[in-house]
Amino acid sequence: MKALIIEDETAAATNLKSLLREIDPSVEIVDVIDTVVDSIGWIRANPLPDIVFMDIHLADGQAFKIFEQVDIPCPIVFTTAYDRYALDAFKVNSIDYILKPIKKQELERAFEKFKRLSGREKAEYVEQTQRYLSARAQSFLIPFRDKLVPLTPDEIAYCYTADEKVSVVTFDGRSLPMDKPLDTLIALLPERDFYRANRQFIVSRRAVRDLSVWFGSRLSVNLTVKTPERIVVSKARVPDFKKWFTGNLRRAKPKILPAGFLSLF
């Protein structure tokens, strides 16, 4: 059996390789890849393995971006540091998921499940995974009073958490309660359009009015809609935020930028 590991944490990849060899010494690990870009290149250039072990957060972005560029018609086991709230989708749309740090008994469970599957069942899992990833976050159904409110990502200006409660705020000013934490939402929302600014906010690129230099080399993100408090990007995250924001601007239609904006970059 041939296995591909897509994982950006060296220690986690080493641990996974060691455990796989303990469980089944005949497993051939064809490669270990740590970025989205390299994963896409490898999949295009090489025969597919029998199974892929895939981390969700990679060095250059979320692994979901891989599926936007290439098909992976083989079973996938997600390895993730997400909490249990975020795992529901992966549980039903992949062969299995493993919560980090990976334990031998959990890997054995996934391995045995894979080996028991017939060819038809493996094909069904592959199709199911592809459907989930292609339809990811096309819309949400949000319970509100006695109704379910449909909401698309294009309607969302920002997501906000306070006092262990999460709200989604739309461009037309509605504030709707969400039963998913921000860690889950950022995984479901399109990466090119949404950014986790800090522990409390996810912001939509379309909602950003302008940026201000803030104390300590931080950035204040000013939106076109009212926010309950200032959105501040830490000094450590500023380069990543700029890369995300300017990268999306290059793909968008040209527009007049706020005065002083270019000087920030």
Image (tube, rainbow, N blue to C red):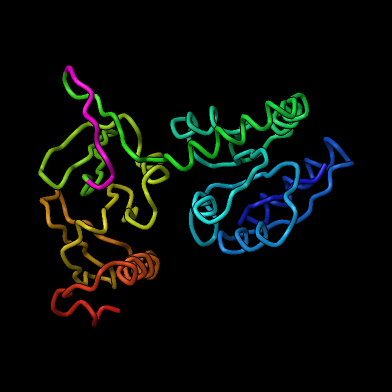
Judge whether 93 appears above or below 134 on screen: above
Looking at the image, residue 213 sits to the left or right of residue 194; the answer is left
The image quadrant of residue 46 is bottom right
> Does 263 appear in magenta?
no
- Position of residue 249 measured from the top left corner of the image (x, y, whole percent): 30, 69
Q: Which residue lies furthest to the top in this view?
A: 146
Residue 206 in sight? yes
- Position of residue 18 measured from the top left corner of the image (x, y, whole percent): 79, 46
- Position of residue 34 measured from the top left corner of the image (x, y, whole percent): 62, 59
Q: Give the range drawn in magenta.
A: 146-154
- Position of residue 237 measured from the top left corner of the image (x, y, whole percent): 38, 64
The image quadrant of residue 206 is bottom left
Q: Nearer the viewer, residue 227 or 123?
A: 123
Residue at screen point 14% across, 74% down: 258
Which quarter of the image is occupied by the N terminus?
top right
Judge whether 199 appears above or below 59 on screen: above
Residue 98 in sight? no
Q: Residue furthest bottom?
A: 263
Which quarter of the image is occupied by the C terminus?
bottom left
Looking at the image, residue 250 sits to the left or right of residue 226; the answer is right
Looking at the image, residue 73 sits to the left or right of residue 202; the answer is right
